[in-house]
């Protein structure tokens, strides 16, 4: 579950459709329409199975290793339509990024987790696409580790072009960028177990992405 600070930032300032939806329990809690106990109770419900709106993917992403592609923008012909993950395939690397609420810029975006994709579920007009991770090839980072993994140290961005994330939840990584990130995971992880997991992820990635780069 998000912290109160992050919840307030997302429901008041986020560009994501569900975060700002008036029916979102997080939004209702911030507006004083739900108690904390009622909010926790809502989180425990499996509302996705019966077809009603579920909570954001971020709530359980480090437990279930599953991410959704989200919905399109609030306005225009595609308003509310579901997104997919074009080009994603099993054995690719998926990285999870964020930035601190309120007082951070896009260039401060960092990586807080990652996994090797095990399954890709295509979306349609009614259901967003999903990526499912292999729990044995998945890793999360504590705050100190994560803040060392600045996303734009590894993701190429055209010099002079303004950094804008927008409402899209996904970006495509080149194999070289992914490998640089995997190397950084090994370096930054403090625990022996974490380093071993990062090494296994790199070995698995290279098995299916035989690239030759100086990293």
Image: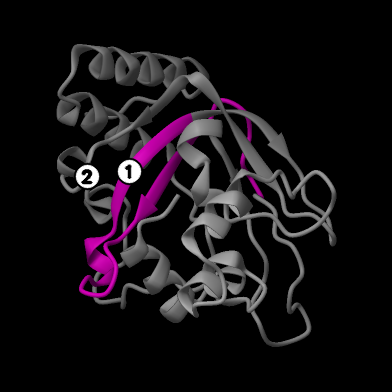
Q: Quadrant of residue 183?
A: top left
Asked whether disc 1 touches disc 2, contact meaning CB atoms under 8 Å apart, the reply is yes
Q: Quadrant of residue 100?
A: bottom left
Tell me if residue 206 comes above or below residue 168 in the rendering. above
Tell me the residue that label 2 is attached to: 149
Please give the range of residues in magenta.
86-115
The C terminus: image quadrant: top left
Residue appearing at x 62%, y 39% in the figure: 131
Q: CA distance from mark 1 to mark 2?
A: 8 Å
- Find residue 121 and report its horizontal and vertical position in percent: 74, 39
Tell me the residue that label 1 is attached to: 112
Residue 121 inside the magenta-drawn segment: no
Residue appearing at x 65%, y 50% in the figure: 85
Do we see residue 210 in this rendering? no
Residue appearing at x 18%, y 18% in the figure: 191
Which is nearer the N-term, disc 1 or disc 2? 1
């Amino acid at each position: 579950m998000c912290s109160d600070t992050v919840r307030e930032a997302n429901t008041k300032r986020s560009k994501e459709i569900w975060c700002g939806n008036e029916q979102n329990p997080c939004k209702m809690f911030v507006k004083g329409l739900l108690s904390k106990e009622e909010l926790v109770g809502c989180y425990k419900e499996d509302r996705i199975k019966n077809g009603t709106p579920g909570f954001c993917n971020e709530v359980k992403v480090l437990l279930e290793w599953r991410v959704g592609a989200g919905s399109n923008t609030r306005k225009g012909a595609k308003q509310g339509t579901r997104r997919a993950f074009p080009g994603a395939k099993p054995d690719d690397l998926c990285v999870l990024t964020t930035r601190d609420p309120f007082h951070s810029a896009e260039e401060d975006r960092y990586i807080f987790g990652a996994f090797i994709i095990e399954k890709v579920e295509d979306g349609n007009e009614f259901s967003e696409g999903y990526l499912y991770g292999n729990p044995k090839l998945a890793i999360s980072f504590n705050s100190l580790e994560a803040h060392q993994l600045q996303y734009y140290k590894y993701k190429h961005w055209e010099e002079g072009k303004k950094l804008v994330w927008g409402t899209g939840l996904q970006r495509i990584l080149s194999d070289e960028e992914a490998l640089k990130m995997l190397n950084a995971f090994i370096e930054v992880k403090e625990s022996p177990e974490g380093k071993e997991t990062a090494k296994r992820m790199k070995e698995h990635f290279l098995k299916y992405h035989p690239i030759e780069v100086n990293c």
